[in-house]
Image: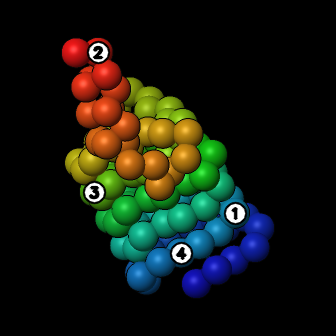
């Protein structure tokens, strides 16, 4: 599902992929879907992968089970997160290869 603009979820949502410019998951929300957007703010429960073009903000009540790809992340005290975190200026960057190449250059 693609939505142009801002989406706020305060209840239960299940789907495969939710693509929105701005995504806000409220403190009472329960979401089971992959999320993709420019900015993603989470206060509730998310089961699924998150991909943001600008930033992800995890508020103290956020509970996330899934991988996050973003150039910038803010994680506040109290957050529960299980998954891989990929931080790079471009979300699709092959971080592993870049770091291994940099390591090899210093031999």
Task: Please name which of the two marks, 2 or 4, marks the residue nearer to the observer.
Answer: 2
Camera sees residue 26 = no
Q: Are marks 1 and 2 in contact (CB under 8 Å)?
A: no
- Secondary element under disc 2, as helix, strand or loop, is loop
Height in image: 13 above or below 100? below
- The label number, if any, that marks residue 106 in the structure image: 2
Q: Earlier in the sequence, mark 1 or mark 2?
A: 1
What's the residue at 47%, 55% (across, down)? 92
Height in image: 23 above or below 105? below
Left/right of residue 75 with respect to residue 63 in the rendered view: right
Q: Which residue is mark 4?
A: 18
What's the residue at 44%, 33% (across, down)? 75
User: Which of the two residues, 105 or 44, is positioned nearer the viewer here?
Assistant: 105
Q: Which residue is mark 3?
A: 65
- Secondary element under disc 4, as helix, strand or loop, is strand
Task: Please name which of the two marks, 3 or 2, marks the residue nearer to the observer.
Answer: 2
What's the residue at 65%, 69% (across, down)? 20
User: Which of the two residues, 8 or 33, is positioned nearer the viewer here?
Assistant: 33
CA distance separating discs 3 and 4: 16 Å
| Residue 25 locus on image (x, y percent) | 53, 58
Q: Which residue is mark 1?
A: 21
Q: Are marks 3 and 1 in contact (CB under 8 Å)?
A: no
Figure quadrant of the N terminus: bottom right
Q: Earlier in the sequence, mark 2 or mark 4?
A: 4
């Amino acid at each position: 599902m693609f939505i142009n603009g801002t989406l706020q979820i305060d209840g239960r949502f299940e789907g495969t992929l939710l693509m929105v410019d701005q995504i806000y998951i409220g403190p009472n929300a329960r979401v089971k879907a992959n999320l993709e957007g420019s900015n993603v703010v989470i206060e509730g429960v998310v089961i699924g992968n998150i991909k943001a073009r600008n930033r992800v903000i995890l508020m103290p009540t956020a509970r996330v089970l899934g991988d996050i790809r973003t150039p910038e992340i803010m994680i506040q005290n109290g957050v529960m997160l299980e998954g891989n975190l990929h931080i790079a200026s471009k979300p699709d960057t092959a971080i592993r290869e870049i770091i291994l190449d940099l390591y090899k250059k210093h031999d």
